Amino acid sequence: MFSLQNKIIVAAIAGMFLILGGAVILSGQSMAEPFNQGPKKCAECHKAEFQIWEETKHAKSFKKVHKSKLAKALAKATGNKSMKKNETCVQCHYTLVAKDAASAAKAKPKAGPSCESCHGASSDWFTIHNNRAEPKDERIVAATAAGMRWSFDRYGIAENCNECHGLANANIDPEKLAIMLENGHPAKPDWEYVKYSQGSIRHRFYPPDMTKNAEMTPAEMSRAFVVGQAAKLVSATIAISRSGSPKFIEFQQARAEAARAALSGVDAAKTLIENPNRENAVALTAAIKDQDLSGTVGGLLPTEFK
Ligand code: HEC
Ligand code: HEC
Ligand code: HEC
Ligand code: HEC
């Protein structure tokens, strides 16, 4: 069990080198951004995960979020009054889907946040993913290099939720994020990974029983809590450094403070608290990977889930 996990981590690290190597090899060619193919493409094989996703707010919001007064006002304040065409809103609220590389620049919103919003746009990793003749170790390395975010990339997954839910998406102009906040876009400094990931969105169909959507053990939950807080602290710190808006900075400081308080009892988090950057957060995630931290953070864990 642990040896598989170790292998996977080694493979993930190797994947990062492959990305670097790939960038060198491909630097002569034009590297197109990967694009989304949409959740139906994944549903062909992942029926259980799709059925869970369909019932989530991520899926259901697609038909209604743009209709509220608030949505219209926010869209107008940030430049394009159609939420589905507003380049800021679409980054977080929709899955922009394209048929092929040629039409990728004109990808259209076809769903709310979906599979690829969390697991990575699949155009470059889809063929690798479905070539199951290839040994799994090698597939993991290649798919990671092509942009797939696996379930065992604990930090990457929590970081990605925090970028949307913490209004800290690095691809979005911080000026626009500040305008959203100033015009009443929801902002929750107490957003917490375990509370939000172990309710409606949970899909954890793992061996030995692939038919069971497994709940986290207390030890898993304690680690997920710490990793989530680490991602929150780092994303808030980066967001603060990018913005000049007092209201935006105040919100990000509240996120950072909440995360610091949650991590204050965790010995392995000392370096991260002193110097909140991604490298230290990834190191913390690796350091606690087999630990049960319920003794330290158990009292802070949520008992109700979204
Ligand atoms: C043709 C079938 C097929 C399609 C289509 C497919 N998958 Fe998979 N996927 C699998 C199988 C089988 C596995 C099981 C483990 C493996 O990779 O060996 C898997 C594994 C995964 C995992 C890894 C589980 C882990 O432990 O992290 C993720 C994440 C995933 N798929 C996401 C997706 C997404 C997102 C899409 C759509 C873009 C997709 N898959 C499309 C068959 C498919
Ligand atoms: C950085 C990511 C991000 C961007 C950009 C963003 N949103 Fe949001 N939005 C969210 C998240 C996350 C929520 C859910 C907050 C929660 O309830 O936890 C949300 C919630 C909302 C809600 C409330 C929905 C409800 O069900 O109550 C509206 C309305 C909304 N956003 C409109 C917009 C509009 C319009 C834009 C573009 C100007 C926009 N958002 C841009 C992430 C974003
Ligand atoms: C909001 C983010 C999010 C969305 C949307 C999402 N996933 Fe996941 N997915 C995760 C997380 C987080 C895990 C890891 C769960 C764990 O191990 O705690 C995961 C794990 C998985 C796994 C491995 C566990 C299992 O259930 O087999 C597969 C396969 C997978 N996702 C496929 C999909 C597919 C297909 C979709 C779309 C129908 C999807 N995911 C949508 C976040 C997401
Ligand atoms: C691409 C941006 C994006 C990512 C990534 C993302 N979310 Fe969301 N999430 C949203 C938006 C937008 C909403 C609000 C939808 C609405 O209300 O219309 C939302 C809503 C939710 C809700 C419903 C909240 C409620 O009050 O009912 C949950 C739960 C949630 N997200 C959990 C997660 C978790 C956990 C992750 C990471 C594994 C994640 N999300 C990743 C954008 C995102």
Image (cartoon, helix red, strand yellow):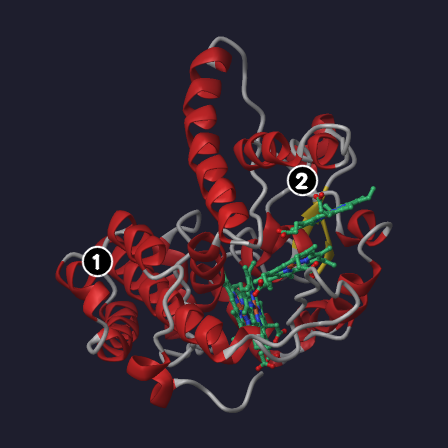
Asked whether mark 2 and ligand 1 are closer than 8 Å, the reply comes as yes
Q: Is residue 211 above or below residue 100?
A: below
Ranked by sequence position, the earlier of labels 1 and 2 is 2
- Identify the image quadrant of the N terminus: bottom right
Front one among 261 and 38: 261
Residue 251 position, x and y percent, is 30, 74
Label 1 sits on residue: 276
- The kind of residue tagged 1 is Pro
Residue 103 position, x and y percent, is 73, 31
Q: Residue at point 50% right, 40% down? A: 7
The local crowd at label 1, few if under 14, some if 14 to 19, many if 20 or more residues have their Cα within 10 Å, is many
| Residue 221 in sight | yes
In this rendering, position of residue 153 left or right of residue 47: left
Q: Residue at point 44% right, 47% down? A: 171
Label 2 sits on residue: 122
| Residue 185 in sight | no
